[in-house]
């Protein structure tokens, strides 16, 4: 589960190059946290990336 429920940011794919230039597949995962947030007026646990948390796109539930 590496997908933000707010912005939809997910896993990115690419290549890793060794010193001898051998290419292998790799992936970059977003920093996703499971938080309790207000969704449609009710508190709910959702997965949110830290960029959305920091920019205030969601309202945290206590």
Image: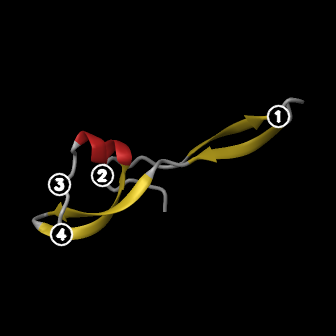
Vertical comparison of 53 with 33: above or below:
above
Q: Is residue 42 above or below residue 24?
A: below
Residue 1 lies, in percent from the top left, at 49, 62
Q: Residues within 10 Å of mark 1 (few under 14, many from 20)?
A: few
CB contact under 8 Å: marks 4 and 2? no
Tell me which label, 3 or 1, sits earlier in the chain.
Answer: 1
Of callouts 4 and 2, the N-terminal one: 2
Q: Residues within 10 Å of mark 3 (few under 14, many from 20)?
A: few
Q: Which residue in the protein does label 1 denote?
A: 18
Question: Earlier along the polypeptide chain: callout 4 or callout 3?
Answer: 4
Q: Residue at x 69, y 45 (%)?
A: 26
**Residue that mark 3 sits on:** 59
Secondary structure, mark 3, is loop
Quadrant hosting residue 5:
bottom left
Tell me whether circle 4 and circle 3 mark residues in contact (CB < 8 Å).
no
CA separation, marks 3 and 1? 43 Å
Expressed as whole percent of the image width and height from the top left, the position of residue 28 reads: 58, 44
Q: CA distance from mark 2 to mark 1?
A: 35 Å
Q: Secondary structure at mark 1?
A: loop
């Amino acid at each position: 589960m590496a997908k933000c429920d707010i912005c939809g940011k997910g896993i990115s794919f690419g290549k890793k190059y060794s010193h001898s230039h051998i290419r292998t597949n790799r992936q970059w995962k977003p920093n996703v946290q499971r938080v309790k947030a207000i969704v449609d007026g009710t508190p709910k646990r959702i997965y949110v990336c830290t960029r959305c948390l920091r920019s205030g796109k969601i309202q945290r539930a206590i």
